[in-house]
Amino acid sequence: MHSDGVDPLQLSKLIAELERQISEMGVSLRYDTSFERLEDILPLDEKAELTPHFSTALNTYTEANAFWVGGFDADGSLVALNAVRMDDMGSGCMRDFIPRYWHRCYPGRAGEKAKPSAEQPEFWQRMSGRVAYFGEFALKRKGYQGKGLPKVFAPLMLLLAVQKFSADWYLTWVKPRDWAMRYPLAYGFTTTYEEGLLWDDPPASIDPDLVAAVNDRSQVRHVIGVLKRRHLTTSSS
């Protein structure tokens, strides 16, 4: 068994099935660990550049701690994107990591840098160990709306992160309007926290009231079970 309590053979079968479904939509997938190469092939619709979470100006990633997957159309144009990195909290927790990390990422409204509050939601204190963070989610709108690509592509990214990192926690940020449309649940995240970050000086360039979407190991096992019943059972019937 996988260290997440996941059968690695079943996980591989499920990944292959989601990849097959994406291929049938006319999208080919590329797995890569070079974020310099990713910056070279942007933009993707409104996403002109990487966020500070993955920008090579602020981060140095290796194949051991981050990867991205792009979906490309028949002409070789980027039509879907998601990236994952793994942060190891060591003996600490996300409650200590979050304020220090976000302070250097974004400009503030009042000062040079945004300033997270010293008091953060309690759930961050429970989040320790290995944390896989998902960012840069983008999808080309024209020609791909209504095809169901996000509902296959986003869960595939979760499965690839489980396979590569076997993390203790899986985390992404969601804009409030996307949370209201239940996107986190559709994309494989089972728990959401409104106002996931509290600020003394809110960021000037992003929403200050982002929703945190989270899975722990047991929730990931549940998601994988749902995906198996939804996709493997259907494909074999």
Image: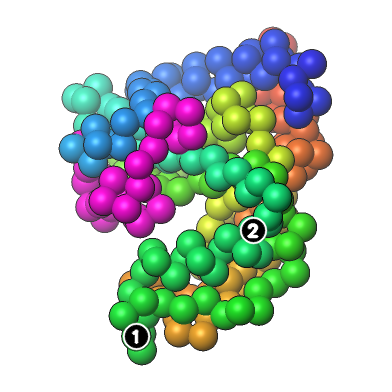
Residue 66: say if magenta: yes
Residue drawn at point x = 56 percent, y = 15 percent: 16
Q: Position of residue 58 (x, y in %)?
A: 32, 53
State the residue at coordinates (60%, 43%).
88
Amino acid type at circle 2 is Met
Residue position marked by numbered label 1 in the rendering: 111
Q: Left of 107 or right of it: where is 115?
A: right
List the single residue furthest toward the bottom: 110
Q: Amino acid at mark 1?
A: Gly
34 or 11, which lies in front?
A: 34
Residue 177, image x, y percentages:
51, 67
Query: What crowding class fits label 1: few (fewer than 14 Cα within 10 Å), some (14-19), or many (20 or more)?
Result: few
> Could you tell whether 77 is left or right of 22 in the image?
left
> Number of numbered discs present?
2
Q: Does residue 10 belong to the magenta stretch?
A: no
Magenta stretch in the rendered image: 41-67
Prevailing secondary structure class for the magenta stretch in the rendered image: loop
User: Which residue, given by chain and number where applicable, does mark 2 sit on?
Assistant: 94
